[in-house]
Image (spheres, coloured by chain):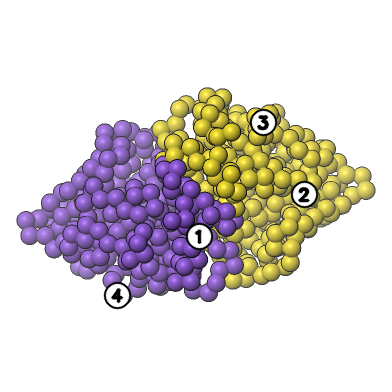
Chain colours: A purple, B yellow
Amino acid sequence: MQVIEVLREASKQVYQSVKNLAGTEDAAGDFGRGAGGDISRRIDIVAEKAVLDYLKKINFQCVVLGEECGRVELSDNPKGFVIMDAIDGSANAVRGIPFFCCSLAFATDNKLSSVTDGVVTDLHSGDMYWATKGKGAFMNEKRIYVQKSPPIYKIIGVNVSGSSPELIKKLQPVFKSSNHTRHLGANALELAMFARGLIDVYIDLREKIRVTDMAAGYLLVNEAGGFVLDPDLKPLDSDLGFETKLSFIAATNKKILDEIVSQIKK
Amino acid sequence: MQVIEVLREASKQVYQSVKNLAGTEDAAGDFGRGAGGDISRRIDIVAEKAVLDYLKKINFQCVVLGEECGRVELSDNPKGFVIMDAIDGSANAVRGIPFFCCSLAFATDNKLSSVTDGVVTDLHSGDMYWATKGKGAFMNEKRIYVQKSPPIYKIIGVNVSGSSPELIKKLQPVFKSSNHTRHLGANALELAMFARGLIDVYIDLREKIRVTDMAAGYLLVNEAGGFVLDPDLKPLDSDLGFETKLSFIAATNKKILDEIVSQIKK
């Protein structure tokens, strides 16, 4: 069984487990702080359990790195890491805003650039976005690409929730110049929509994003023809640690990137 | 036929007309500037035509105020105004981001506070939000209310697209204090979701919102138990003119309002 098939099936199990839970009181139950530092909600725990149960059932030889469960070694001789944010956009999921997803990725080594497979499933619609390194990105069975021609409305995803005053100040010209900034509240799903050609730039410079939030999205954007850069405009990379917090800019092409970068204050 | 039934049926006609158009190249066709000042897209025109055709067909005695078509007098002896943003969130609709709606309201006089009926239809899901003054707000057939108990995750809608540097500076503490700000890109649908209890505060102080964008959402929020205030914290009101640009804050209750207002810099 190919790694991508394992992730896709695990992701389907999550969709089945939570599709009637989002927006209910039951979804919100408090399970204490997870490995990533946020409060684990019942919907997070149910979703992670679906993945872990499936990986155990098929005896998949890996180490799981989960937003809630932390590091779980499912083998003494692992083939690599499953990087899991079983519910990305937990606040949306708990409140019932129809925009949250399951993000699963597989990496051969302890770094983001070694991610070989990624799956983001929209847990509201059930749409599945997936990619294998070197083989392109897909939405369900259709090949997807980032927006190639100049868009009629340029959509700029910007996350400034919990931002420092300094960062807001740096990004102020971006807000001023765009009538179409967005912040939908589920990083991995926003990157999947970016890969599908619906968003042109995505900026998150808060140093708050964890690798679990973006490993799959990172591969999707790269395989769909876009790029994901660090604040020094080098290809984003990092270890897979829970303590590692990332900032990044994703862009569909160099022209759009240069335009945005020229707006951001030094 | 009750006014609310007329608006609901017109809204259904829009849903039928555009449900296969969103996100297609066809949706984006340029029809020049509409009455509201933005470029009218084919999807906007198709949606407005559906409403106008229906109102003419049933011989509804009114004056239509439409984002694209401007003032259209359908009677010499009108009962009132139909305030129409047939596609709110046009950029999302054209790009295929599944978050846009049809907003229709009915007002007896040339002012927002005389709105008696409002319908917002989510044109992706087909869900219909509607309200009649004094009779409560509904989503499909279910009565809806704003969030009443303190929310687990407080969601703050903030629109700063195209904002002045001064406004960004004023709102900076709001971003700093919240990990859950959102901007989904369709004002009327965000107010409908607010009325349904999914968003707790909604801030748009850009002086850019037109009455057509928010007449229905305004009634939904009020009928669901929330309130919509102007920048001086008085109940929002205005004439129905196309040139009138509004700023507002919607909140579910006084406590949440006071908290946000104390954060906004003078």
For the residues labelled 4 and 3, the Cα–Cα distance comes to 56 Å
Q: Residue A134 carries which label?
A: 4
The answer as to whether the residues below labels 4 and 2 share one chain is: no
Circle 2 is placed at which residue position?
B243
Circle 3 is placed at which residue position?
B232
**SS category of the residue bearing label 2:** loop
Q: Which mark is residue A263?
A: 1
Chain on which label 1 sits: A
Q: Quadrant of residue A27?
A: top left
- Please tell me whether residue A206 is drawn above or below residue A117 in the rendered image: above
- Please tell me whether residue B248 is drawn above or below residue A157 in the rendered image: above
2 or 3: tag closer to the N-terminus: 3
For the residues labelled 4 and 2, the Cα–Cα distance comes to 52 Å
Asked whether residue A231 appears in the rendered view, the answer is: yes
1 vs 2, front mark: 1
**How far across and down, in percent of the image, does residue A57 sit?**
17, 54
For the residues labelled 1 and 3, the Cα–Cα distance comes to 32 Å
Q: Which mark is residue A213?
A: none
> On the picture, is A72 further left or further right than B4?
left
For the residues labelled 2 and 3, the Cα–Cα distance comes to 20 Å
The answer to whether the residues at label 4 and label 3 have Cβ atoms under 8 Å apart is: no
**How far across and down, in percent of the image, does residue A198 sit?**
49, 63
Residue type at numbered disc 3? Asp
Local packing at callout 4 (Cα closer than 10 Å; few below 14, some 14-19, many 20+) is: few
Asked whether residue A54 appears in the rendered view, the answer is: no
